[in-house]
Image (spheres, rainbow, N blue to C red):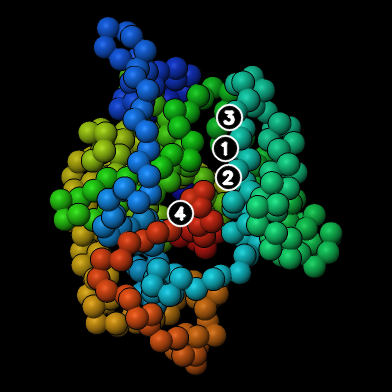
Amino acid sequence: MSPASPTLPRVNDFAAPVAQAPPDVPATGSAGEPAAEPAAEPAASDRPARGPSLSPSRAADFLTCPLLYRFRVIDRLPEPPSPAAARGTLVHAVLERLFDAPAPDRSPAAALALLGPEWDRLAAAEPELTSLFADETERAAWLAEARTMLERYFALEDPTRLEPAHRELAVEAVLDSGLRLHGYVDRLDVSPAGDLRVVDYKTGTAPRADFEARALFQMRFYALVLWLSRGVVPRLLQLMYLGNGEIVRYAPDEGDLRATQRKIEALWLAIERARAAGDWRPKRSRLCDWCAHQSICPEFGGTPPDLPSAHGAGQADRSGRPDGRVREADYGM
């Protein structure tokens, strides 16, 4: 796939190991003295109530189908685990743990050796995952697909030449309107010059051109949050598609991020209007094939449950990670 931007920074700019702390997290206090201990976390009862919030996953839900957003955020309907989502979680976990090892030890064999322990950990935390497979043969075939994705990762980059500043980084920023933007970045690299690269692993395949903009919206969302919270525009956004071994790279600028903020604000206004009117219209698409709620969707002859009594405007998006999120990559987004 061709790069998403005609002018990109050199990927090798991020290849040198990064030893320093990220720009907004000083390692020492003034005059080189050790940094002071952080203040104690306030008790839950003392914390101020949080206002409305939005993550890129829930923004994608509303763009895909307002009724899906309602089911996940307003109704909070449970969704059964799926093999694709579980595989995405497993591969992400392995790639996160891989960087715990010293750089010379980050080999394909080391990554594959993590598959079993990480699956055991995930299955212990979520026992329902074990019900995904009819028998051991089916589970073995599923694990083989995860192994193929990990091997594909090593064909895309060399982790022995990287030292990520953060993995599974929680990011957030509050707009002037009071809307809190939040999410989790799979990996944040910081070059020796202080440039930021936002990396997201996708266990699906690279999307067609008409879906590529949707995938990049998630990355621009993260870039906007980092810009607002750190005062730095990320130099490179990188989507790594492990389903077919392609990389999409984009170099944003302030104009891109201002446009992204306007889009998010307009999207939130649409969400508030839908909530105030109780009007969550379904939108049929090929993504319906993966939806867990077809049986109660009007597009498929179903009837949604009555709206909860408390569903006023301003309800926060409490989607979390790590986080149990449905990984958009597995659904071609």
Secondary structure at badge 4 equals: loop
Mark 4 vs mark 3: which is more N-terminal?
Answer: 3
- Drawn side of residue 135 relative to residue 299, left or right: right
Q: Amino acid at mark 3?
A: Phe
Q: Secondary structure at mark 3?
A: loop
What residue sits 54% from the left and 85% below the top? 295
The residue lying at 29 percent from left, 54 percent from top is 50
The quarter of the image holding the C terminus is: bottom left
Q: Earlier in the sequence, mark 3 or mark 2?
A: 2
Mark 1 highlights which residue? 96
Determine whether label 2 and label 1 are within 8 Å by CB: yes
Q: CA distance from mark 3 to mark 2?
A: 12 Å
Which percent across, then down, holds residue 307?
Answer: 38, 82
Q: Tell me, yes or no, whether the two marked residues, 4 and 1, touch with CB atoms within 8 Å.
A: no
Residue at left offset 73%, top offset 56%: 142
Question: 10 Å neighbourhood of mark 1: few (<14), some, or many (≥20)?
Answer: some
Give the Cα distance between marks 1 and 3: 6 Å
Disc number at residue 320?
4
Label disc, if present, on residue 99 of the rendered structure? 3
Query: CA gap, disc 4 to disc 1?
Result: 17 Å
Q: Which kind of residue does numbered mark 2 sit on?
A: His
The amino acid sitting under disc 1 is Glu
Query: Label 4 crowding class (10 Å Cα cut-off): few <14, some 14-19, many 20+?
Result: some
